[in-house]
Amino acid sequence: MGKRIRELRISAQFTQAQLAERAGISNEFLSKIECGRTAPSVVTIQRMAEALGVSVDELFRDVQGTDAVDSASARYVLAEFLQEAGPEGRELLMRLAQLVRRLVDAKRSG
């Protein structure tokens, strides 16, 4: 995700300092995100998307335009959601995960 944010920032002709200010984060934190040393929160992802004038979905695409959600980013986003969701949200997420797993397994089986 960091690589994509950097690409979009450069395309928008923003410096790191400009994007960081627009997104309400520190320049140092943005640098760590772009280098892949830390993952942003869901709120920060939303703020960066708004600052860049793109959808959140666009931040999760790689340079070639294909989906590129790395496992570290996915784990971070899911963990944050689980903390904030409450019991009903966690139950729903578990059911969805089980459904997705069955669909993926069925697709692999042919």
Image (spheres, grey):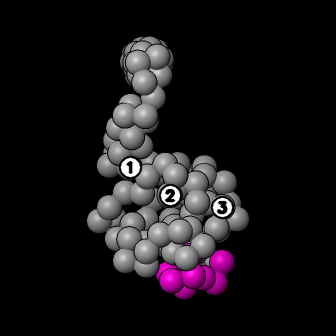
Residue 51: x and y in percent read 64, 67
Residue at the (35%, 38%) spot, across then down: 79
The disc at residue 44 is 2
Stretch of the chain drawn in magenta? 12-19
Dot 1 or dot 3, earlier in sequence? 3
Kindly identify the amino acid type of the residue bearing the numbered disc 3: Glu
* Label 3, residues with CA under 10 Å away: few <14, some 14-19, many ≥20: some
Q: Which mark is residue 21?
A: none
Amino acid type for the residue under numbered disc 1: Ser
Left or right of residue 39: residue 65: right
Residue 13 shown in magenta = yes
* Sequence order check, earlier mark of 1 and 2: 2
Secondary element at tag 3: helix
Q: Which residue is mark 1?
A: 73
Q: Which residue is mark 3?
A: 50
Using residue 54 as the reference point, say whether residue 2 is left or right of it: left
Q: How many marks?
A: 3
Residue 105 is covered by the magenta coloring: no
Kind of residue indicated by mark 2: Thr
